[in-house]
Image (cartoon, coloured by chain):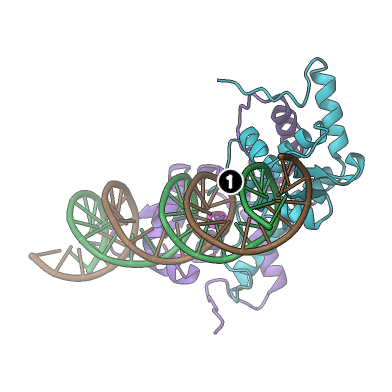
Chain colours: A cyan, B purple, C brown, D green
Amino acid sequence: MKRDSRLSSVLHALLHMAAFDRPMTSDALAQCMRTHPVVVRRTMAGLREAGIVRSEKGHHGGWVISADLSRITLRDIHEALGEPAIFAMGHRNDNPSCLVEQAVNARLGDAFDEAEKLLMERFSGVTLAEIAKEFTARYPKERLETHTHGT
Amino acid sequence: MKRDSRLSSVLHALLHMAAFDRPMTSDALAQCMRTHPVVVRRTMAGLREAGIVRSEKGHHGGWVISADLSRITLRDIHEALGEPAIFAMGHRNDNPSCLVEQAVNARLGDAFDEAEKLLMERFSGVTLAEIAKEFTARYPKERLETHTHGT
DNA sequence: AGTTACGTAATAAATGGTGTTACATGAAAC
DNA sequence: GTTTCATGTAACACCATTTATTACGTAACT
């Protein structure tokens, strides 16, 4: 299966935006993330609707964060992206008439539900501010707005 | 992304086989699972190599379980299937040179690792025997080998 | 020998994220 | 007011992966 990297991408983008004191254009973000500006706009659309970012057109336009970093959790972002599927595995039939399959689904579902619950708890417990802080703690000399790409 | 239903499918098949006192053909299993016999053989191949099932050719051939139900865990089956990806989400770059992205990956990775660990623990704790037992507890009057499909 | 059933490769279909183009809209600069 | 910059969005091709199907080979039983 192809893995969905929107959450990872968007977090990356948000942290760059957070450390930049002016709006960042989709082109600039796309360059950071090695993707296409349209992909950036498409991905950010949900965050804009959720009030996490704001976009401005025209000269000196672009994207800015419009909420307090310490109040934005990974969970919020996951939601804003439309709650993409977490697991790559699923039931073959969601409402099987076969009783054996019902038992299998119930048992498997319990395990997945627990794992999902834990993941969502972790997501709820991590704010953008924490990741930004963790970054500056690890690399105090780096300037966030100086984006360094390796070879 | 397309969701992988092999684990669910194979569990379903195994429980039917467990309750059947003769080998079940790929065709019979495929009918249960509403799929194609070749898919059954392909999916079962890993389990055969892992010693969980055995296949026999020719007349009255088919698939039989070759291990103790109480010693086969969901984890064993997941392994036998080649450990398919658990999460539908992933990092955009696994070894980014961008320090911001490294911080994001680290934080996200922690959450996913924890969830995966929990899921694997749950998988390790569930045996086929338990699911079979749970089934008979829930539906004592049903005969497992009588496979009922709804409309 | 013929039938049954697995073994496996090759190929197509379906799905869903990603990349790209094209065109429209709005805001700032001149 | 026209130009330029930037987002908004639809449309479409691309790609990776599971699933479905066909085809042909092999082993075992009758």
Q: Is residue A103 above or below residue B114?
A: below
Q: Is residue B150 visible?
A: yes
- Residue drawn at 48 percent across, 42 percent down: B50
Name the quadrant containing residue A135: top right
Element class at badge 1: loop
Q: Give the image location of residue A95, x and y in percent.
A: 63, 73
Amino acid found under the numbered disc labelled 1: Arg
A19 on left or right of B148: right
Disc 1 packing (10 Å; few <14; some 14–19; many ≥20): some
- Residue drawn at 63 percent across, 50 percent down: B70
The residue labelled by disc 1 is A3
The magenta stretch is B5-9
Of residues B39 and C3, the one drawn nearer to the viewer in this rendering: B39
Chain where mark 1 sits: A
Of residues C20 and B34, the one drawn nearer to the viewer in this rendering: C20
Q: Give the image location of residue C12, x and y in percent.
A: 32, 62
Of residues B106 and B100, the one drawn nearer to the viewer in this rendering: B100
Q: Give the image location of residue B62, x and y in percent.
A: 38, 60
Residue A97: within the magenta? no
A62 on left or right of B57: right
Q: How many marks?
A: 1
Q: Is residue B100 above or below residue A51?
A: above
